[in-house]
Image: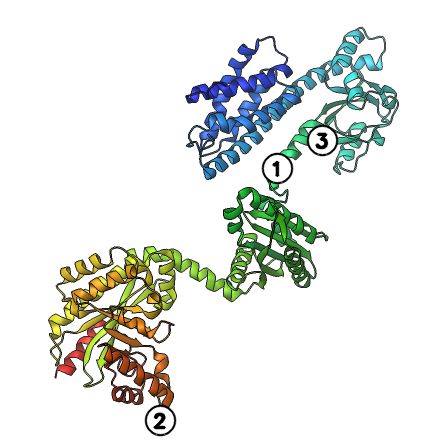
Amino acid sequence: MSAEPDGPEDRLRRFATIWSRALYPVTATSLTRPEFESQLLPLARQLRQDLAERVFRAADCEAVGAALVATHCTEPEALSRTLDVVDAYLVLYCGEEAEPDEAGRAGGVGEREELRARCSRIQHAVAAGFARALRERTRAEQEAISRAALEARGTVAEALHASEARFRAVFHGAAIGIGIADLEGTVLEVNDALIRMFGGLEHQLRGRNVAEWTHPDDSPHVWKLYEELVRGDREHYRVEKAFYRPDGTVLWTNLTVSLLRDADGVPQYQLALMEDTTERRLLNLRLRYEATHDALTGLPNRTLFFERLEKALAAGESARFGLCYLDLDGFKTVNDSLGHAAGDRLLVEVADRLQSCATAPGEMVARLGGDEFVALTTGPDTEHEVDELAGRIMHALSTPIRVEGRELTVRGSIGIVEGPAAERGAAEVLRSADITMYRAKHAGGNRYELADPEADARAITRHGLTTALPVALERGEFFIEYQPLVHLGDGSVRGAEALVRWLHPQHGVISPDRFIPLAEHTGLIVPLGRWVLEESVRQARTWEAVTGADQAGLPLRVNVNLSPCQLTHPGLVSDTVEILERAGLAPGALCLEVTESALIGADDDLLKPLRRLAEMGVDIALDDFGTGYSNLANLRRLPVSVLKLDRAFTQGMQHFPADPIDLKIVEGIVSLAHSLDLAVTVEGVETGAQADQLRELGCDTAQGWYYARPGPPDRLHELALADAT
């Protein structure tokens, strides 16, 4: 077996060879096949260039189709074979810009799909150019014949005209169909080409009246033009018209009808010229179908679905619509475990079941891509019908699907949008359905949810915040507020917790509970956390320079929260050391707060950075203590020096007398912490009664609105100076 061509030019010549071998048998040419191949080589080079271009130029591809007609490749079979060759071999031999995969095919999966999509558009453009050039060529023949017919119209009226022989030769030898009828519409003469178009029986055409050739697909103005012509009000007209053959099949034609007058200008006959466009029409229908239907399932694709949806939404204010947006739950697992071939078979079966659910008038099912499907219903009672449609879909998916000898349970999440047609656009409707579908998926899946405008708005806002986060950090839209940490024994300020805020240009100040989860999800929490640490350490050094030490001889300490993502970042220790050294702040003035849930089941690798920081003198606080499910015995192995009790433990102490159960729990935790040499900080202190009880129970420090709300760093200066005096 011969080796594949090495260079791009070799592969191009191989493509041209395959193309010439396909076309040569159906081409009327005196050239040898190698000579014919040399004519196709520039066209192949143009196709390769069009395949590689990122910006698709339809005119270049259409020029290739026109060039085929110029090389006498005028048979319909020539176009069909050209499209087959381009579809099968263009990407294989001319997609050299993509890296080959293990199977030798060009590009990875994504690149091959893009090349295949571009190849499909090239086919459409080549077909359009071929059809246009062939139509122009035929039109030129028609005009020549028409001129000959006009020159011979005296022959029709006067049988003894001298040029009858020449007219007959043109009439019967023409490649297009020609018919002559009187002004009443009775067919007088037909040529051989027209007889072949209608099935080869001349007696079924001659003597027939043209009024009998009506067809349901005739446009309304066809017969109006005919009446104007036979009255003498117009000289000719051209239309696309369908005819029934005697065997019941349909013949599509480009029909040109001209009025023939005698020497005095009086209308005498009508001359019809017909070009058979049936094959071309079938090709266009095929290309249209392929462009608007999913190749795997045969369902309408995104393009056709949007056309139908936009039509439904433009139906008027009284119309309504209902849309179900379906996404299969866990489909990726099928692809990963059984392979993509099994996943494709599963999608085909799902598509068949969905198709059986939408059979009523005004209903359709489409595949948007991947494992996402949509079902559309229209009518006056879609509010009820769309619920029934979603129920039928869920029921259809409840029966397991057998793939490769295994029964697979199919689950799906559906988002439903229903309402008046004239209120929203197609993109907005689909976005609402998509958001609603993900809401159903997050609620556990295998269910459907109705669209909620408020939920949509929250999801859109969340998406907008996620997109704006990276730019916000670059623009300096974040700032830090500080909430004082107060010593319960003497009421002095011992430091503050740094709390980051986002000053959004449109939404104003956004609290961390709204954007910290987004930052963790996008990975931006690491650079954001480093910025918070830098700013907080710099601020602590400023406090130290302004206030010195407090009355206990200790520097003001700043507490900075660490997210679980930061704990696993390899640069945590080095970044912290660098920030402290650059600011000139002692490690003892920094406390890093880690939530209890982040350390549940933590292994030694996760605890190692915290141990190194603790050994340097940085305090580690276990935040929200009591909200997780960690074993209290684990406190012995955690490198923490402070326990921060969650505010849930102190809510029962806001009024006197305090809840005795809360008192016992807090008393036990404080006793345990002190026995392990851990300090206890309490969050959420809002009343003096709480502060008194916590002081009596032995808690060390506290923070909350009773002392101060989070605020600018300058206010902490004032509180600390007041304590010092």
Expressed as whole percent of the image width and height from the top left, the position of residue 26 reads: 64, 16
- Placement of 77 over or under 453, stated as above or below: above
Cα separation, mark 1 vs mark 2, equals 78 Å
Q: Are marks 1 and 2 in contact (CB under 8 Å)?
A: no
| Label 3: few (<14), some (14–19) or many (≥20) C-alpha neighbours in 10 Å | some
Of the two numbered discs 2 and 3 on the same chain, state the one appearing first in sequence.
Answer: 3
Left of 192 or right of it: where is 327? left
Measuring 30% from the left and 81% from the top, which residue is drawn there? 669
| Label 1: few (<14), some (14–19) or many (≥20) C-alpha neighbours in 10 Å | some
Left of 323 or right of it: where is 90? left
Q: Disc number at residue 79? A: none
Of the two numbered discs 1 and 3 on the same chain, state the one appearing first in sequence.
Answer: 3
Amino acid type, callout 1: Glu
Expressed as whole percent of the image width and height from the top left, the position of residue 187 reads: 85, 23
Amino acid type, callout 3: Glu
Residue holding disc 1:
290
Nearer to us: label 1 or label 2? 2
Front residue (pair 536, 197): 536
- Placement of 541 over or under 33, stated as above or below: below
Residue holding disc 3:
240
